Amino acid sequence: MSDEEGPSVEKTNSEDSSLPEQELESVEEPQAVEETESVEEPKTPEDTEAVVEAESVGPEPAEAPRPVDEDAIDSTEATVDEAVIEPTDVETTFDEPTIVEPTIVEPAIDESANEVTTVIPVVPAEDAPPTEVVDSAPATETIDEQTEQFEPPAVVVPPKPPRPEFVQQYDTQQFEPIQQQYEPVVREPEAVAPPAPQQQPEAPAPASSRKWVKPAIALGAIFAVAVIAYGVDIFTSSGKTPRGTQVAGVDIGDLTPADAEATLRAELGPRLVEPVAVHAGGVDSEIVPASAGVDVDWSATLSGVNAQPINPITRITSFFGSREVPVVSTVDQGALDASMSQLAANSDRAPVEGAVVFESGKATGVSPAAGQALETQQAGATFAAEWSDGGVVDLPVDEVPVTVTQAGVDRALQEIAIPAASGDVVVNGRDGKVATLGVDQIGEVLTFTPDGSGGLTPQYNTDAAIKILTPQLVSTEVQPKDASFTFAGGKPSVVPGVVGDLINWPDTVKELPVLLGSTASRATPAVYGPVPPALTTEAADALGINEVIGEFTTGGFEYASGVNIGLAASEIDGAVIKPGDTFSLNEYTGPRGAAQGYVESGIINNGRPDKAVGGGISQLATTLYNATYFAGMDDVAHTEHSYYISRYPEAREATIFDGAIDLQFRNPAKTGVMIETIATSSNITVRIWGTKTVDVASTTGPRTSPTSPNTVTLPEGPGCVASSGAPGFTVSDTRVITDHASGAEISSNTRTVKYNPVPIVKCE
C-alpha cells in the first residue's frame, strides 16, 4: 500500500515518543480511515484501563468473508476509541498470511456506561511505516493524561485477509513495556443492527481541571486547620502582650500587663543601681543610672507594647523572632548634668599645640595633638536613651583642633631653634668683664607662638635676657645717686647727686635675634651711657626745703616698742616728697619682720591687747600723722585704733599693720617737703621740713556716747595680757587750715571717731 492510500494519522504523544505507527485498513478494499475523535480518559488507570485479550488460535480453514455493513463500519470508526497498545520488542516471523478474526473483548467496567473496547487487527505493510496511535487530545497534556481513555460502545470491524500481527501493550502506571506475543485472532462479528443516530456525548471535564481537585481539597483542609489554629491563637493570647516582645532584652511576651510589669521591674529595676560602662573619646568610665538621675517610666514603657497583631503572618513570625520595645526613661536633669560634668572633668583633654621647647640646652619639637571635649547635653541624652541596652554607651565628644601643624613645628625647629641653641651668647663689658647667656638659658629668652597659619613665630624676651646679663656686669657700672639733705648746723643743706654710668641694656640686646641665629660670631659689646639721678642737685636746691612746717612728739612706749620705733624712724629719715607726690609708710619702710631687725612687741588684735613682731610701729604712725596734719598735708589714708590709747590725742591718731593697714599723705604744696625723725629711748619726734604756706588749728570735741567694758577671762600664759579695761566713747576733731600770709581760711574738716571700750582681761 502506498503512502497516498494509507489513512491520515496524528501523533498523540510528545515528539520524543517512540510508539510504532500502525496502519488501519478495511476488510474488502482499501478505504480511507476517518480520524477518530479524542476522548478524555477516566480519572484512574484502574477504572479505565482497556483490557485487551489476545487468543492464540491454531490453523483453521479459511472462511469466506462475511458481509459487513459499511455504514456501521463508518459509524464505528467515527466513535471508536483508540486501542491501548503497549510496545514490544518481539520480532515475529510469518510463513504465510492467515486470516484472523477480530476478537471483541468487553472490559470489566460498569455496564451502564455501554463502553466496549475493540481490538483492531493490524497488518504491517512491507513498505509503509507503522502508524501512530491517534489521540486528539491537546499536545500540551502530559503522558498521564494521554493514558486516560473513554471507551465507546463495541463495534465489529469486518476482517480482511489475515496477516501476521503483533500487539504491544503499555502499562499506564509504570510505562514499562510488557513483552508478549500474540497470534492473530479473527472473531466472528455478531450481527448488529445499524446504530440509531446518537447525540454527540458530552465531553468530559478537561483533565487539567480535574487534576487540581485533590490538591484543592488538601489546600482547603489546610486552610481550614490554619483558620482554626489562628482563631485558637487569637483567643488564648487575648489580653496578653504580643508574643516575642522584649524590653531591654527582657522577654515579656505572652504575659498579662500586670505580669509583664512585674517581670520588667524584677529584671530591669536592679540595673538602675548597677554601673553602666561608657566610652567618651579615648576615655572609659562608668556611670550609675540612679546616681545620674535616670529612672524607668514603667507605664510609658509598657504603653509602647502594641496590642495583639491581627495579621496572621505577623503572628506566625512571632514564633521565630522578637520585637524590641525601647525603655522610656525619666531624667532628673540637674543630677544628669552634674554626672556629665564630672565625667567631662576626666574625659576632656586640652589640645596639645605644636611647639618648640629647650631642654638642657637642646631644642626639641612638640608634635601637635587635637584635644576633645564632652558634649555634655548630647551625652546626657544619649546615656538616658541607651543605658538599658546592656552594652557600652558611646558618648559624643567634640574634637578641639590645634592651630599649629607638624610642618610648622619642623620649620621653626630647623630654621630658628636649633641654630639658637648652637652656642652661648656673650656680652663684653669694661675691664675685660663679660656676661654670658648660656645655651641652657636660651629657653628663657626664646619662645614660639602660633602665627595663625599653621606655623610658629619666634618671640625674643629681652627683659629676661637683661635680667640674666645685668648682674654679671654690674661691677663695671657707676650707679646714679640722688641729691640729699643734711641737717648739719640745725638747718638742712643739699648734698649733691651723682650721675651714673650704666649699661644701656635695650641697646645692647637689640641684636639678640641676630646673635641667636648666627652659628659664627655670637658676641656683642655692652653699650654704656650716662644716667642722671632721680633728684639732681639743681632740683634739690629748687625744692624750697628750708624750714619746719610741721612737728609732733609722742612717748611712753616700752623698750621693745622703742626698738621697733627707732628702726622704722631711721628708714624714713630724710625722705623727700616732691610737690604732688604721695608718701606711703608701708612702701617706704618695706617689710618689718625679724629679718629686718624688728622684735616682738604689743599690738591690738581683735580689740584685745596682744603681741607680734614689729609691734609698736603704730606710735611712729601716730607721730608722723600729727606732724603732717599740722604741716597742712592732704590725708590720703589712715585708720584709728579700735579703742582709745591715752598717750595719743583723741580722734587724731593712727595705727598701722604690715601689708594691711597703711598711712598715706600727699604733698599739696608747690615746694617739696622732707621728713626728719629723732628717736630716743623714751619718745619719738617727727619734723616736716619745707616752705611754710599755711597754718593749721585743731579743735577736739567732747566725749559722747560712753560704753562700759566687758570682762574677758583667758588661760594664763604668754598669750594672755591682763588689762584693767577702759570705757568706750565717741569724739570728734576739727582741722581748720588758713593761709599763712593772709590768715584766710582755706578749709575746715571734722572727723568723728567711735572708740570701743577696752575689755577687762583676766588671766586665770
Image (cartoon, rainbow, N blue to C red):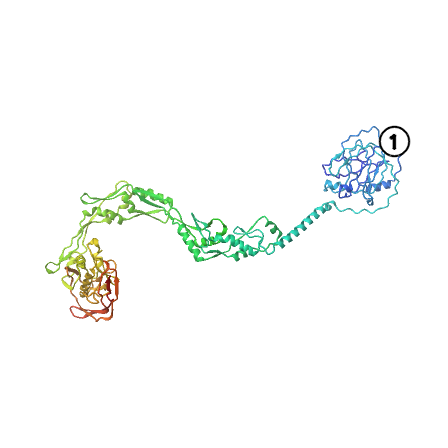
Across and down, in percent, residue 290 comes to: 46, 55
Q: Amino acid at mark 1?
A: Glu
Along the viewing direction, whichever of 16 and 92 lies nearer the viewer: 92
User: Which residue is outermost to the front?
Assistant: 764
Task: Give the quadrant of the C terminus.
Answer: bottom left
Across and down, in percent, residue 39 comes to: 78, 43
**Looking at the image, how many numbered discs can be counted on the residues?**
1
Task: Give the quadrant of the N terminus.
Answer: top right
Across and down, in percent, residue 726 comes to: 22, 67
Vertical position of residue 761 compared to residue 502: above or below: below
Residue 574 seen anywhere in this rendered image of the structure: no
Instruction: Please state if 472 lies on the left or on the right of 22 as rendered.
Output: left
User: Which residue is outermost to the left?
Assistant: 489
Instruction: Please state if 350 lies on the left or on the right of 500 as rendered.
Output: right
Residue 177 seen anywhere in this rendered image of the structure: yes
Residue 255's quadrant in the figure? bottom right
Instruction: Please state if 396 lies on the left or on the right of 18 as rendered.
Output: left
Residue 359's quadrant in the figure? top left
Along the viewing direction, whichever of 272 and 222 lies nearer the viewer: 272
Residue 534's quadrant in the figure? bottom left
Which residue matches tag 1? 60
Across and down, in percent, residue 323 comes to: 56, 51
